[in-house]
Image (tube, grey):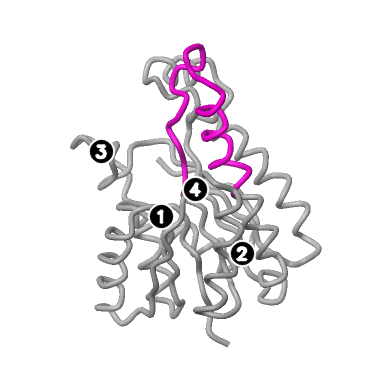
Amino acid sequence: MQRTIVVCGYGPGISDAVANKFGAEGFQVALVARSADKLEKARGALEGRGVKAAAFPADLSDPAAAKGLVERVGEKFGRITAIHWNASANAAGDVLAADASGLRTAFDVSVTSLVAVVQAAQADLKAAKGALLVTNGGLGLFDPKVDAAAVQWNSMGLAIGNAAKHKLVGLLTHKLRADEITVGEVVVLGLVKGTAWDTGNATVDPKTIADRFWEIYSKRESRVVTVG
């Protein structure tokens, strides 16, 4: 049966590298982000390399939209084999000035919508003995220097979301083990080339991260890997 990966939070950098890596390994690729134009361009590039791909515009800060995404992908591609969660939100940058909406956005993108997608796709992932692959960032680490950096960079909401997402990955690793679903997390400790954060001094190659995700999937080893 044809394998399908859903790349949630598609953009230049990590998720593009993952889409190309899994596509090159024979996967169909479902691309998910808010911008339909960006997705269409990426779809065309993948298909130009011989990868079957489709665009699924969606706002992943909306848990209902995230849950509905699974049905949309299934109608197009059939059973889902793997989910790559690359979505993040740099909302509520200053938590003392943030409103409830900003805080909810930071949490929903990192946790609530991710849970909604896993709930909707669990039967598919179990049948395929598939994988949940999560990108995370170093701002979620419990370290005073990291906390100081998050405050300095006005990225406090992102740091909170990353920390909660890391805990969720640990919980899902144990919860989904009985279903033989692999759960992997790559925590990126540096700036990634080609992303919005790259001002010319990024050092992390997104292809390296994609390779780590492929290793987790292909070896069926649930684990957390740091890169950077």
Q: Which mark is residue 198?
A: 3
Q: Residue at x 53, y 84 (%)?
A: 2
Q: Secondary structure at mark 3?
A: loop
| Amino acid at the residue labelled 3 | Asp
Structural crowding at the residue carrying mark 4, measured as other residues with C-alpha within 10 Å and reported as few (<14), some (14–19) or many (≥20): many
Q: 9 or 189, which lies in front?
A: 9
| Amino acid at the residue labelled 2 | Ala
Q: Which residue is mark 2?
A: 131
The magenta-colored residue range is 87-113
N-terminal of the pair, mark 3 or mark 4, is 4
Structural crowding at the residue carrying mark 1, measured as other residues with C-alpha within 10 Å and reported as few (<14), some (14–19) or many (≥20): many
Q: Which residue is mark 4?
A: 135
Q: CA distance from mark 4 to mark 1?
A: 15 Å
- Toward which corner of the image does residue 149 lie, by quadrant? top left
Q: Secondary structure at mark 4?
A: strand
N-terminal of the pair, mark 3 or mark 1, is 1
> At which x and y percent is residue 147?
50, 18
Q: Is residue 223 magenta?
A: no
Q: Residue at x 39, y 20 (%)?
A: 154
Q: Nearer the viewer, mark 2 or mark 1?
A: 1
Q: Secondary structure at mark 2?
A: strand
N-terminal of the pair, mark 2 or mark 1, is 1
Q: Is residue 24 above or below residue 213?
A: below
Q: CA distance from mark 2 to mark 4?
A: 13 Å
